[in-house]
Structure formats: C-alpha cells, structure tokens
Amino acid sequence: MGNRSSNRVRLKPDTTCYTPTPYQTPTDHTPRYVVSGFSRTAILVATLAFIAIPASAQQTDRARTEALARRAAERLQSLQREADRLATQERTLIGDLRKLELERQVKGEELKQFDRDAAKLEAELAGITERMGALQQSERKARPELTARLVEMYKLGQARYLRLLLSAPDLRRMGQASRTVAALAKLDRDRVAARAQTLAELTSTRVTLAQRASQLAAARASAAAAEAAVARAAQSRNELIRDIDRRRDLNAQLAGELQAAQQKLQVTLRELTAGATPAEPAALPLRPFRGELDWPVAGTVLRRFGRSAGRSAASSNGIEIGAAEDATAVAIHDGTVAFAGAFGGFGNLVILDHGSQTFSLYGDLLDIAVKKGARLERGHAVGSVGVTDAGTTGLYFELRVDGQPVDPLQWLKKR
C-alpha cells in the first residue's frame, strides 16, 4: 500500500483479483489499475468541498435575499404608516376647509349687509343734502325782502314802532298799525329762527350720518379683510390637500414598486430553496427608500444642492459633506459599480448603478476600494474620503433619479 501521508493519488496494479472473463484469454494478464483506500478518501473530500462551495454560496444568497425581503417589508410598513398619516391630515384639512367655506359665506353675507346699509346711508345723506340745498335756495330768495324790511326798520330807529303808531290818523287805525307791526316783527323773527333751527338740525343729522358712513366703511373694510383672510386660508388648505394628494399618489406608486420587488424576492427565495440558481441577483429599487437612505459618510454638509448664496456662485448637482480624511465612504443602496477611476473635476470617482436610471456618485476619494462591475450591498465601502477642490477634506456626493440630479438631502435620512 502507498504512503497515507502523501497528498498525491497513487495507482497500483491489482493482480490479486484478476479473473479471466469469457471475453479474455487466460494469457491476457494486462494489469487493471484501481484507486487505493487513501486515494478514494481524498477524492471524496475533494468532491464534498466542490459541492460545499455552491451550497455555501446559496446559503449566502439566501441570507442576503431574506435580509432584502425584511427590509422591503419594513419599508412597506413605513409607507403604509405614511399613507395613513397623510389620509388623516387630508381628512383634517377637508374638515378645516368646510369650516372656512362656511365662514367665508358668513363674511360674504356680512359684506352684502354692509353694502345695503351703506346704500341706505348714502340715500339718506343725499336726501338731507337736497333739503339743505332747498332751504338755502329759499333763504337766498327771501333774503332781499327780509333785508329791505330790516333796513326800513333800522331807518325808523329805536322809536320806529312809536312813530309808526303816532302817524296813524285815529285810534282805530293806530290799533291796526300796532297789530300789523307786531305781526310782521313776529313773522320775521319766527322765519329767521325756523330757518336757523332747520339748518342746524340738518347739519347735525348730516354730521351724524357722515360719522355712521365712516364707521360703516371701516366695518366693511374689516369684513372685507376678514373675508380675504378666510379666502387665503381656504386656498392654502386647498394647496395642502393637492400636495397631500400628490404625496399619496407617490406613496402608492413607491409601494407598488416595492411590492413588485418583494414578489421577485419571494421567487428568488423559492428558487434558492429548490437549489436552483436565480436568473438575476436579488435587488430592491432605490426610489421607495426616499428619505430613508443611509448617509455615505458621517459629516457636515459644506455645500448644498443647487445654486449657492451669491450670484457668482456656480450651481452644484450634488452636495459636499465635510469629513475626516481617510474616513470610509459607503454605498447608500445596493448597486453595481458602473465606473471606478479618476474623472476630471471629480478626482477619484465611483458611480453605482441602482437600476431604473438611478445612480449615486462618490467623488474626491482618496482611494477607491471597488472595481467596475462589482455588485455592492448597502453599506459596502467604496473608498476613503480625500481632499476636495476647495482644499477641504470631504466627499462629493450626487444622486440621480430618472437620469436627473436631485437634492440628496431629500433622499437621505434626516438628522
């Protein structure tokens, strides 16, 4: 027998178990080679090792797929909670909107009443103004006669009535003259007093009506301002309801995408359980995780998305996160490395393709830890933080959805 300590498979001729068959002649003594006991053991171990490698890989794929399925289920629950919260908000806003509509109707009726009262006051003011004008016109017509009489009375002097009485030829005429003079004097006094009183009353009434008109105008202006405020509040509620409707539609769309991905994961799990190799690796879409993505590196945002302060500042398609040099930058979501290398204006750059035209970019890296074509899981290192163009240490991070740059801060977790 050969040495068991040897790692080579050794063959030896088997001459003890040779038995001629009907198809062999007794002179045919060609030796048959058989595998020794140790050699059979080595082959068995090698075969088991060869089988164990795919089995281990399947177990890893299964564990990864199960983890993705759990993450999808958790995110679906979160989206459902968000949908319930949005529905509650919408119901509250609709209730507020109904109250505001009722309040606006009340304010509208108040304005109509103010307009009716104002029209009535204007009519009264117009009537008083017309009466005052008529009295003034009558006074102007009667003024020459009254003036002439007053002049005549003045010419007679203080003893005017006495001389007028003494000028009568007899006592009967004197009595008539006396009565006439007294009547004229009283008539003049009454006429002047009546006109003065009427003008005073009209003037007072006109002042009162003017004050009421002013107060009414102020009240109407206040009611109009209140109605405008109610209208603005109603418009704001309507805009909020429209925004919530859009968010609910987006929520339903994202939940649908996630449910489709979850169904694919279940198919993959069944294939792995059956021992088959999945047609494509298990993956989750990025869009349903808006607002729940992990940060690529811990740090402070030094530059935001879009145009920075100042007219001369250039627009940025991503953000710059200040972090310690050589800090690890990680993938925010599962994806495939579409690019890994130096790129003009971005330094060392890694681009991950997350499918469905969604990409994440990691720039200004000190070094790159991945290669093009590699499949990365969420949290896998893509490289280390280097120095930016501004001379600070940090990571340039960009996110593209449907091929267009979006604000990463709206997609990363709030902190």
Image (cartoon, rainbow, N blue to C red):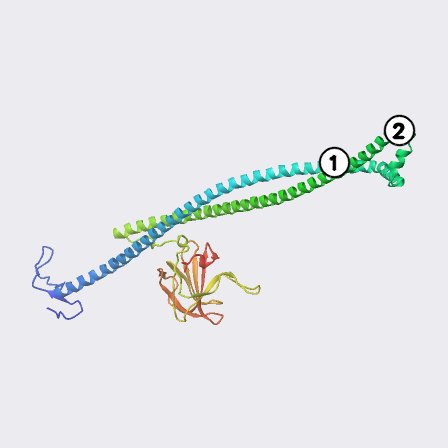
Up the image or down, 354 lies above or below 114; here it is below
Residue drawn at x 85%, y 32% is 178
Identify the element where label 1 is drawn. Answer: helix
Tell which residue pokes out farthest to the front in this image: 171
Up the image or down, 197 lies above or below 360; here it is above
Q: Residues within 10 Å of mark 1 (few under 14, many from 20)?
A: some
The one of 24 and 123 positioned closer to us in this rendering: 123
Return the residue at label 1: 131
Return the residue at label 2: 171
Residue drawn at x 49%, y 61% is 305
Disc on the earlier residue, 1 or 2: 1
> Can you give x and y, in whole percent of width and height, for residue 26 in the image?
8, 60
Q: Tag count in the figure?
A: 2
Q: The residue under label 2 is which amino acid type?
A: Leu
Name the image quarter holding residue 46. Answer: bottom left
> Can you give x and y, in whole percent of width and height, for residue 57 in the image?
27, 59
> Can you give x and y, in whole percent of width and height, for residue 39 in the image?
15, 65
Quadrant that contains the C terminus? bottom left
Residue drawn at x 16%, y 70% is 6
- Residue 36 appears in the picture as rendered: no
Q: Answer left or right for 319 relative to 123.
A: left
Identify the element where label 2 is drawn. Answer: helix
> Can you give x and y, in whole percent of width and height, for residue 318 in the image?
47, 62
Q: Answer left or right for 2 relative to 403.
A: left
Q: Answer left or right for 51 relative to 318.
A: left
- Residue 309 appears in the picture as rendered: yes
The one of 260 and 371 positioned closer to us in this rendering: 260
